[in-house]
Amino acid sequence: MLKRAHYWALGIVTVLTLLLLNLPPSAAGRLKLAVSGVFLPLFGLAGSGQSFVDRASYSLLTRRTLISEVERLQQENGQLRLTATQAQDAMNENARLRAMLGWQPKNPWKRHPAHIVGREPTTWWRSVTIDFGARDGAQINQPVITNDGLVGRIRAVGPTHSEVALIGDPECGVSAIVAETRDNGVIQEARSSAVGDGHVTFRTLQNSVNMMAGHHVLTSGLGGIFPKGIPVGQIADARTVEGGLYTEARLRLAANLNRLEEVWVLVP
Amino acid sequence: MNWITSLLLFLVMWLTVFASTQFAPLAGWVGVPLSLVPGLIVYAALTNHLLLTTGLCVFAGLGLDALSANRLGVSVMPLFLAGFFIQHRRHLILREQAYAQFWLGFATAVFAPVATLMIMSLGQREPLHGWSTVWQLALSGGINGLLCPAWFLLFDALRRTFDYQPVAESSFRADRQIKRGRL
């Protein structure tokens, strides 16, 4: 038998839940930010702890390891300088040709580094929290990448942190193109693979007989969120679906979303 | 339970909610984000009064929603219902027994996400779920079930440290003893 106090508790929590679930999205977003502010000291503490552990691990490296690492980085730096010079020449040429044809000039995207400071505590969304907020210039829908490939887009922005919807989340559809066959398609998440195993589903807009395992998939630039040409992943296998109307492929993501530590936010 | 141990319960819940966003290596290994909140709700419901249990469920639900992509408030009702039911029926539960604690932790860790998924399915954003969700629920249930007796051990130790412990007076008094012997 329920006592009066139980009825009161049940009533209050029910009313509170209904109120919260029926808040307008903007008010709910602001309230969510306010509640997450309660955990800001812990985010700061976790970040400091992580950097302390990193510094401590650096001090354990031997001199020989450091010297060989410096030599490797110097070699890589030299190669990258050469590639950057060639890329700059190509960009200048591209800009001149665009000007001659009267096309809009292409502005390169700036990259801002960010650290992963939190992961999604539930299994039904795919998102991470980064230490790059509104005060750093974060805005909703900015693309997030790693050196390997696309990660996702910023979904919500707080003063010091932002929430990133990862590829495969229902709210992070990506328009992509197969580099080898130029087939256009969209990346979506298969409902049955909620565990992040590094694969997502890629569906072409028409049947493609030429698409094969190993082909590279890049962002197509359609949709206006992701710039064209960011690597997304490689085709693992492909099959025809819906009576031969479409081709559906499993795409092995280029960026390992389970091992993310540092990412780049692209700012136009 | 005095106000210090109640405050400690909120403090541990605060840390636990935050910790569920920080188990990246472990979560990546088992393929499941891990939340230790349900086990703590079971402990609170079995040992505390309704007001504290309700406050803790609301705090945990709001915290989990704020740190995830959930709509704010969607986790509050499932956690509260679990805590409410256990709190209401605790006189029938063998709460001192570890196996009872295990099964309550297991059941709460399975019930709360399933109820949250059901509430979210009523909305516009459809969450990701499939057969692999069953594996996630089983694993989360097992971990929370195992952890539930550990919460009891931890908070019992804290209670012994901070709560008032009445001194058990002995009825023995030396001046009231009957002395036998030769007169």
Image (tube, helix red, strand yellow):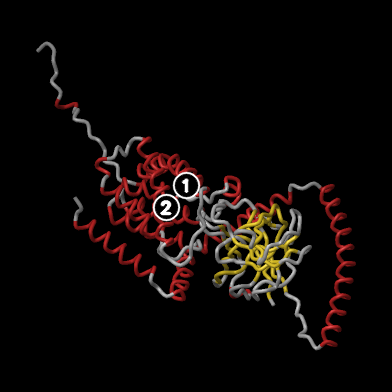
Given the image, on which type of amino acid does mark 1 rest? Leu
Helix, strand or loop at label 2? It is helix
Looking at the image, which residue is at 33% across and 51% down?
B83
Q: Viewer-proximal residue, A199 or B182?
A: A199
Q: Is residue B143 above or below residue A107?
A: above
Q: State the image coordinates of residue A254 (x, y, percent, origin top left).
A: 71, 57
C-alpha separation, residue under disc 1 versus residue under disc 2: 8 Å
Helix, strand or loop at label 1? It is helix
Give residue B114's mark. 2
Disc nearer the start of the sequence (1/2): 2
Q: Are marks 1 and 2 in contact (CB under 8 Å)?
A: yes
Query: Label 2 marks which chain's residue?
Result: B
Q: State the image coordinates of residue B91 (x, y, percent, origin top left).
A: 24, 42
Q: Which residue is mark 1?
A: B137
The picture quadrant where one finds residue A174 is: bottom right
Q: State the image coordinates of residue B56 (x, y, percent, origin top left).
A: 36, 56
